[in-house]
Image (cartoon, helix red, strand yellow):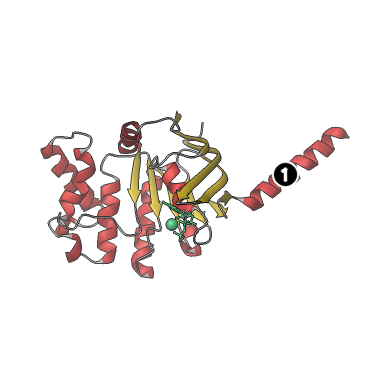
Amino acid sequence: MSIISLQDVEKNYQLGETIVRALRGSNVEIEEGEFIAVMGPSGSGKSTLMNMIGALDVPSEGEVNIDGEEINQMSENQLALLRSKKIGFIFQEFNLINSMNARQNVALPMIFRNTPKKKRVERADELLEEVGLGDRKTFRPSELSGGQRQRVSIARSLANNPDIILADEPTGNLDTETGSKIMDLLTELNDEGKTIIMVTHDPNDAEYADRIVRIVDGKTNPDEDLENQEKLKNKEKDDEN
Ligand SMILES: Nc1ncnc2c1ncn2[C@@H]1O[C@H](COP(=O)(O)OP(=O)(O)OP(=O)(O)O)[C@@H](O)[C@H]1O
Ligand SMILES: [Mg+2]
C-alpha cells in the first residue's frame, strides 16, 4: 500500500471574483521509503501539492490518503493530529521562531504532542547533535548561518519521529556547498527508512531522489500520463490480436 496517494486531486482558491485552479488533476502514488523530487515551473502547483501531501489543507476535488487515512473530510484538529504524528516539515524560509533559541525551536512540535519538558529538551539536544549543531543549542536563528538555520529546521522536522518528511526547496536559500550537506542529511534520513518528498528547482538536488514527480499547470506527470496512455493503447491492440 502507498504511504501517500492522491487521486484526481484538484485545488481551487477563490480570490474575490476569480477562481485560481492551482491543481487540476494530480495523481501521485508514493511508496514507503521512497525519496521523491517534485519539479515544475514557478506557479505550477508544487507547494499546493505539498500542502495536500502534508495534510495542511484538503483538496477541492479528488482524494488524498496519508498512510491509509483519507483526509478529505477531516476537521482542522484531526488534520493537526495526523500531521504531528506522521509528518515533518522543512520549509525554504526555515520558518523558525526568532525569539526562541535552537533548542526551543526543535522542542516546539513536541509540546503539541504533550511530551514532558525534560524529555523535550533531551530529544531536542540529541537531534541538534545529530545535525552537527551540538555547540549551537542556545543560539537564536538570527545568530546562525543559513545552513545552520536549515539544520535546525531539519532537527525540528524530526522532533516527533515522523515517517514522512516534506521539504519545500530545502536548499533554496543556501550556497551550493551548504546545500549539498543538507542533501546528504536528507539522504541519511532516507537510508534510515523515512519517506522523503522534496520540491526542488535544482537538477543536482533531484539527482539524490529515486524518482521525479513533474508538475505543469497543476497537473502531475503529463509525459508519464502520455506514456501510460500509449502503453494502454498498445496493450489494447495486443489484446485484440
Ligand atoms: N492561498 C492562495 N490563494 C490564491 N491563490 C493561490 C494560493 N496559493 C497558491 N495560489 C496560486 O496557485 C498557483 C500555484 O501556486 P504554488 O504556490 O503551488 O506554486 P509553486 O509551484 O509552488 O511555485 P513556486 O515554484 O514559485 O514556489 C499559483 O498560480 C498561485 O498564485
Ligand atoms: Mg512553491
Nearest the eye: 232 or 207: 232
Number of labelled discs? 1
User: Where in the figure is residue 144, as x and y percent of width and height?
Assistant: 20, 64
Q: Residue at x 53, y 58 (%)?
A: 40
Position of 101 with respect to 90 (left or right) is: left
Q: Residue at x 55, y 53 (%)?
A: 215
Q: Residue at x 33, y 35 (%)?
A: 76
User: Where in the figure is residue 233, as x and y percent of width and height?
Assistant: 78, 41
Q: Amino acid at mark 1?
A: Gln
Nearest the eye: 30 or 70: 70
Visible in this render: residue 196? no
Task: Estimate how packed mark 1 is, as few (under 14), some (14 to 19) or many (20 or more) residues with alpha carbons within 10 Å.
Answer: few
Q: Which residue is mark 1?
A: 229
Where 197 sits versus 67, above or below? below
Q: Residue at x 35, y 66 (%)?
A: 173
User: Where in the figure is residue 14, as x and y percent of width and height?
Assistant: 46, 48
